Image: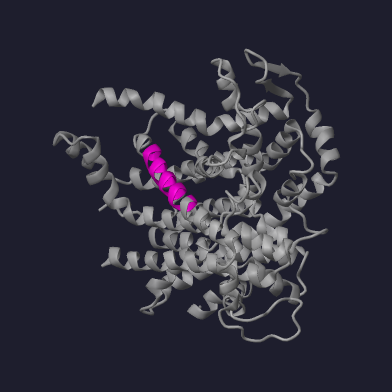
Amino acid sequence: MRTAALLAPLAVLVVPFLLWPALFGLVASFTNYGPLESQVRFVGLDNYAAILADPQFLIASRNIAVFTAAAVMAELGLGFAVAYLLREIFRGHALVRVALLVPWLVSPVANGVLWHFLLTPSIGPLDFARAWIGLPIGPSPLGVSGLALPTAIATDVWRKAPLVAFLVLPGLLAIPRERWETATLEGARLFDRVWLVALPPLVPLLFTIGMLLVGDTLGVFDSLLTLTGGGPGSETITPGLYAYQQAFRTNDWRLGATAGWLVAASVLLVGAIYVRSTRAVRH
Amino acid sequence: MRPRMSARAPLLAALLFVALLPMVWTMLASLGIVPDNTASPPRWRVAPSLGEYTDTIGVAEPRFATELATSIVVALVATGVVIPCAFLGAYGLARWRWRGATLVVPSMLVLGSLPVVAYVIPLAETTRRLGLTDTLVGVGLAQAAGAAPLAVYILHSILGRIVLPAIGPAVVATAVVIFVLQWNSFLVPLVLGAEKVRTIPVAMSDFFTFERELQWPTAAAALVSSLLPLLVLIAAANALLQRFRLAEVDPS
């Protein structure tokens, strides 16, 4: 079969339902296009000017920068650490390995609902522990200014760090046994074993996982919708949430689509760095 | 060396406890076992019953059973579309003798990382123009398209690594992972679906609003119901998932 014929079904699926909308979003962001607009005309950078003049969007951009940096680093770091603990097979290893997937099975929407209740003082496990040792139960951190964003980040880490461990583990298990033994004989400490034995062969895999995490986090939206709704105030609003609210709540299609396209642009920017890095690794 | 080994078990146990406690807490609540932290010391109120599943979900969300069925159909359709398209595509890319082909595969991962919110607003417009809004076909294809690039990336690495007889299990493991993504997909069914196509995540976001505060045991029963099919799936596919690889790892 010809290569083109093999790629055709994929193209039929991806072009109309992924590539075209993404490109259309880019083109539309320079026009006044909207479902209710009768005459489409070029408006230059008007939409971008409008969005950058909206303090809500600026707060959302700052929030997502903090969210992405903190969540992705914590997920990669913790995920790697857990996988490192699992690098030798023991009884029950397979069970632990598949259990790593469980938090990820909770959908982002369900994750928001779940943690909303788990952090409710009268019924949640954290306040149960506080009450047990005699501390007064506190208000939900999701409603406390300054705590809402870190708490939202923590729930994201809970959901995805074990998944990272699951994805990293095959890479660690592929490292030949002799290499660990040689390192131990040479007196390598934990730091050396991680830095010199474990990490080098895993770099491409960690880049791949990092790319997926960055994309997923830059678009974070559904978990916050049910967890905080963007509050308190605008403390947990993100560009994804902003785009959704503009397009489907305020019915400002232009602002929403432009915000969405800016999310796409940020992912594609990271993606360009990722693609370059895969070439650098190969050569 | 040995003392470090003995630190591993308690550390792992603690991490597993943190990872799984929320699920256990939720399962207990869905069965009517809820703590009362306002008492000192905190108490457990134990009134075990299946009432949340049999009655209360139906009151909070009358069409819960239909939505569960819709979710299953949409996720199956989308996975069923993604895997063959992605497999053929990955095979095509693997045979492609064009210099730029080496860039296409990592680009697929970037495309697969593109969050739905980045393109969902124009997508809603495209789907409306195609007359596919609120249809199983529209929602299924749009969900499939979002996951297809990632599937291509994973399957391409499988084709480069695994010999023929082992390809089947590796593809099925990939299908399980894609199915989970489809089951949990939210934004596509939220924006493209309406009355006819309503999946569980959409229903959950809907009946959980800040105005109409839901009772925790009812929410817990809904959470468990939405999770149970996936738990059964990964338990059944356990052996396959042990061999799942996101990408090729070359230890040399």
Q: Position of residue B19 (x, y in %)?
A: 52, 34
B64 versus B4 height, above or below: below
Find residue A46 and report its image quarter.
bottom right
Q: Residue at x 50, y 45 (%)?
A: A160
A190 versus B34 height, above or below: below
Q: Is residue A187 visible?
A: yes
Q: Is residue A15 visible?
A: no
Q: Residue at x 57, y 68 (%)?
A: A53
**In the rendered structure, which segment of residues is drawn in magenta?**
A67-83
Q: Residue furthest top?
A: B41
> Going by the image, does A169 lie left or right of A281?
right
Q: Is residue A265 magenta?
A: no
B158 versus A180 height, above or below: below
A249 versus B245 height, above or below: below
Find residue B50 and report its image quarter.
top right
> Going by the image, does B23 lie left or right of B92?
right
Q: Position of residue B61 (x, y in %)?
A: 82, 43
Q: Is residue A72 magenta?
A: yes
**Mostly what secondary structure, the magenta segment?**
helix
Q: Nearer the viewer, residue B118 or A202?
A: B118
Q: Nearer the viewer, residue B109 or B76?
A: B109
Q: Nearer the viewer, residue B22 or A202?
A: B22
Which quadrant is home to the N terminus of chain B?
top left
Q: Nearer the viewer, residue B102 or B165?
A: B102
> Going by the image, does A85 lie left or right of A163?
left
